[in-house]
């Protein structure tokens, strides 16, 4: 079955949007067309940056296949949708002449409402010095309400009068909490007015997406599943509690998209050539020196959603192998290889040393991860500009060896590397890497 999951293999910000845009433009399966791209989890707490002939775009909710008009783009059931962000994003795409007739929103996806964002900020304030470093976009409170069965779904916008009583009960409960925490209570009527406005703009795009995905699968069309964030931010398997409130794993892609368990044919792991993370929590290879600052400056490592500086460090192969085990990668894409062009030496973490002195090569419990010391291999850099490379052979030998070593450590073939933001900067890797 031609379903391809595109998954972040690290802490997020690996370049998944760029990869989805590239695959949609060039063909997802043996050069064939991509019929559908589905965002299967997350909300507007992370941005996928896409650069093409129309400009540079940061997509927080709209799938990254939107720039290919024949491709149907679905915001899946597993997502949480902030209507204000979505409408703003749609307006920015329409402003460059892009049609949104191919955009669909699952009626079963949940709505991120203004008070969810307020609650997110209040919760972070209450945590004080133990704050998680969330984006305060309301993602956690939205998923909490979904699990507690308080949530409002996107499809409910089509029947606001029917849910007025339920929403009134919901707001009465939330206002007690908000006021106890020192926040501003929600005005029910004002919220209902917002819902009416959202309905007017979004109604043409709100559908039951299951018939769409079912028909595409039955017709043997290629479907891309676009994940958000990365494995180490997974709610169950990430560095808890410094995680997101959903599951970026490929296996959840089937749930969030509404596909059967056997549907996935390929799983593409997207790997940045080094490591970055936003927010608090363990990051074993983080560099607090001039090298870490150089990685940040050269790589322009600032969050697409918040603008916060990202924490930077050397590549962590232990985390990558862990990500492979959880996802079953069939291939890898290595992004931002060109950021390493200026370094005479490059390191790869191949194990961890515990406080006891024991050395391990597997991912420990998150409570231990903050205490480990990385064990490094050191590789020679290439100290030349790779940004103009457009074939595997154009890359210097040291860069190719670095890619080969990543392939060996993870045990998964590297199929593409990228040396810039543009589509054409993603180049196929030679046979055998």
Image: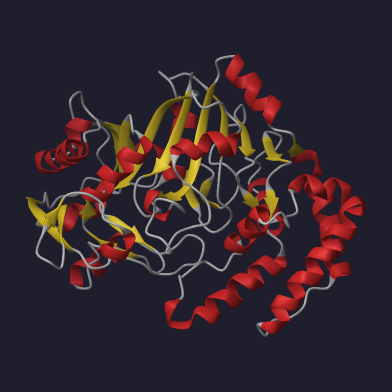
Residue at the far front: name it.
356
Task: Report the front residue among 112 and 302.
Answer: 112
Residue 215, position as x, y percentages in the image: 65, 19
Image quarter for residue 284? bottom left
Residue beneath the point at 54% across and 80% down: 125
Image quarter for residue 102? top right
Image quarter for residue 112? bottom right
Residue at the far right: name it.
161
Left or right of 169 in this view: 216:
left
Residue at the far top: name it.
219
Residue beneath the point at 50% across and 39% down: 252
Q: Looking at the image, what colour scheme do you see?
A: secondary structure
Residue 259, position as x, y percentages in the image: 57, 28
Label tally: 0
Left or right of 370 in this view: 113:
right
**Quarter occupied by the C terminus:** top left
Residue 66 seen anywhere in this rendered image of the structure: no
Residue beneath the point at 46% across and 75% down: 131
Residue beneath the point at 56% across and 33% down: 37
Q: Compared to 25, does 75 lie above or below?
A: below
Residue 155 seen anywhere in this rendered image of the structure: yes
Task: Report the front residue among 403 and 421.
Answer: 403
Residue 249, position as x, y percentages in the image: 44, 42
Residue 39, position as x, y percentages in the image: 56, 41
Q: Compared to 432, does 344 lie above or below?
A: below
């Amino acid at each position: 079955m031609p379903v391809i999951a595109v998954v972040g293999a690290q802490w997020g910000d690996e370049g998944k949007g760029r990869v989805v845009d590239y695959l949609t433009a060039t063909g997802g399966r043996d050069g064939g067309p991509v019929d559908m791209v589905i965002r299967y989890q997350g909300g507007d707490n992370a941005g996928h940056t896409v650069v093409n002939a129309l400009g540079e775009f940061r997509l927080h909710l709209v799938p990254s296949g939107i720039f290919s008009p024949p491709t149907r783009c679905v915001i899946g059931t597993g997502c949480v949708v902030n209507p204000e962000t979505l409408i703003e994003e749609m307006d920015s795409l329409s402003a460059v002449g892009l049609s949104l007739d191919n955009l669909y929103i699952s009626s079963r996806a949940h709505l991120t409402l203004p008070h969810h964002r307020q609650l997110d900020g209040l919760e972070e304030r209450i945590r004080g010095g133990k704050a998680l470093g969330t984006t305060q976009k309301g993602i956690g409170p939205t998923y909490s309400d979904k699990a507690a069965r308080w949530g409002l779904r996107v499809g409910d916008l089509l029947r606001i009068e029917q849910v007025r009583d339920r929403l009134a009960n919901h707001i009465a409960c939330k206002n007690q909490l908000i006021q106890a925490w020192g926040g501003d209570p929600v005005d029910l009527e004002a919220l209902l007015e917002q819902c009416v406005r959202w309905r007017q703009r979004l109604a043409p795009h709100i559908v039951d997406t299951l018939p769409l995905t079912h028909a595409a699968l039955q017709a043997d069309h290629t479907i891309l599943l676009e994940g958000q964030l990365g494995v180490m931010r997974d709610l169950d398997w990430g560095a808890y509690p410094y995680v997101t409130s959903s599951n970026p794993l490929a296996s959840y892609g089937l749930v969030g998209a509404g596909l059967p368990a056997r549907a996935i044919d390929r799983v593409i792991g997207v790997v940045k050539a080094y490591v970055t993370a936003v927010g608090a929590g363990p990051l074993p290879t983080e560099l607090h020196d001039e090298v870490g600052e150089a990685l940040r400056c050269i790589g322009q490592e600032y969050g697409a959603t918040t603008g916060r500086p990202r924490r930077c460090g050397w590549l962590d192969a232990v985390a990558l192998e862990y990500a492979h085990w959880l996802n079953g990668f069939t291939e890898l894409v290595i992004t931002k290889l060109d950021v390493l062009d200026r370094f005479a030496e490059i390191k790869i973490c191949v194990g961890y040393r515990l406080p006891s002195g024991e050395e391990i090569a597997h991912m420990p419990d998150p409570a231990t991860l903050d205490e480990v010391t990385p064990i490094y291999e050191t590789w020679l850099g290439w100290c030349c500009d790779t940004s103009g490379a457009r074939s595997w052979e154009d890359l210097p030998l040291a860069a190719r060896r670095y890619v080969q070593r990543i392939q060996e450590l993870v045990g998964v073939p590297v199929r593409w590397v990228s040396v810039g933001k543009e589509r054409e900067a993603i180049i196929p890797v030679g046979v055998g890497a």
